[in-house]
Image: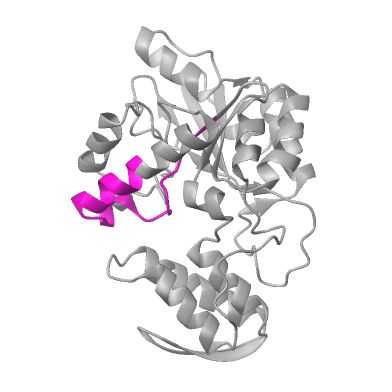
Amino acid sequence: MNAYAQRLGEDTLAIFLFHGVTRPHGCAVRNYTRKHIEPDFFASILRALKAAGGRPVSMQEVLDHVDSGTALPPRAFAITFDDGFHNNLDVAAPILAEEGIPATFYVTTDFVDRNRMGWIDRIEFAVEQHPTGCLRLPWGDWEFSGDAARRALLSDIRTRVKSDAGVDADALATAIQVQLGLEPTFSSDHLLDRKLNWEDVGRLAAGPGFIVAGHSHTHRILEYLDDESLEAEIATSIELLAQQAGIRSPHYSYPEGQPYCYSNRVIDVLAHHGVRCSPSAIDGINAAGTSPFHLRRVMVT
């Protein structure tokens, strides 16, 4: 049985977390984490879930069952995407529609508004172009040569930045690009970078069983923000979805989504803005009665 199908249970909910589904991208080290997977692999996962008796449900159905106190179908599963990559629309959505499976797409509104790259994608973009090099980082110097060393460098940067509230991730990305002889790059139409625009968001939201909802404005870790910045980050994302795409949704997801990334303080601000369901990215499946603000997801890579 497919490893993801093994996460299904008779009285549990499995929520699967994807980011992108893309055609061959021609990169040596970019996407080494498999944030973007191949279309055939994506389709095979969906088919394996159904073949194992999985019952696809939307995140709205999940919330409806919480409200009514009724149980979800046996072996229930939901499909979700984070960030707002364009390939969600032109690659993933047709496969989902063909398989008759609903999905929720949590979009980062600054990414959509300006085709903005996330900080780690900006760094990967720069490192991809340099097989060898030396970087002066806040925690020490790094020399790298070859693909394995570049992947190790990127993994080190990921771990340190995500675990340190004091690091300005975008400033670090700019510094790395400059050290590698590049003009600061914030936007790209590469297959691994291109984001949905507002017209795309509307088209995606009109798809069969599809929901589009918020995933912050700039993808900053919400728990790291002070109260004023936290309010602005959440309010801006919700208002932009309403103004630009006519979407007001009770759904949301936390950027990064690990235990240190959100708290009751974050949940209170989300609830104040009408959010009623926000899954994490903590690995696991969900028993009946799990709070819709503490749902776990299974990362697919």
Quarter of the image that includes the N terminus: top right
Q: Residue at x 29, y 52 (%)?
A: 260
Q: How is the image coloured?
A: one colour
User: Is residue 165 found left or right of 18 in the rendered image?
Assistant: left
Q: Residue at x 33, y 40 (%)?
A: 235
Residue 161: x %, y % from top left: 38, 69
Quarter residue 300 falls in? top right
Q: Residue at x 72, y 72 (%)?
A: 28
Q: Residue at x 59, y 55 (%)?
A: 115
User: Is residue 2 found left or right of 217 in the rendered image?
Assistant: right
- Residue lying furthest front: 243
Residue 253 visible in the displayed image: no
Quarter residue 41 falls in? top right
Identify whether 283 is placed above or below 26. above
> Where does the magenta region start and end?
212-235
Say if the magenta span includes residue 214: yes
Residue 194: x %, y % from top left: 66, 55
Say if the magenta span includes residue 280: no
Residue 81 visible in the displayed image: yes
Task: Tell how many labels.
Answer: 0
Identify whether 222 is placed above or below 43. below
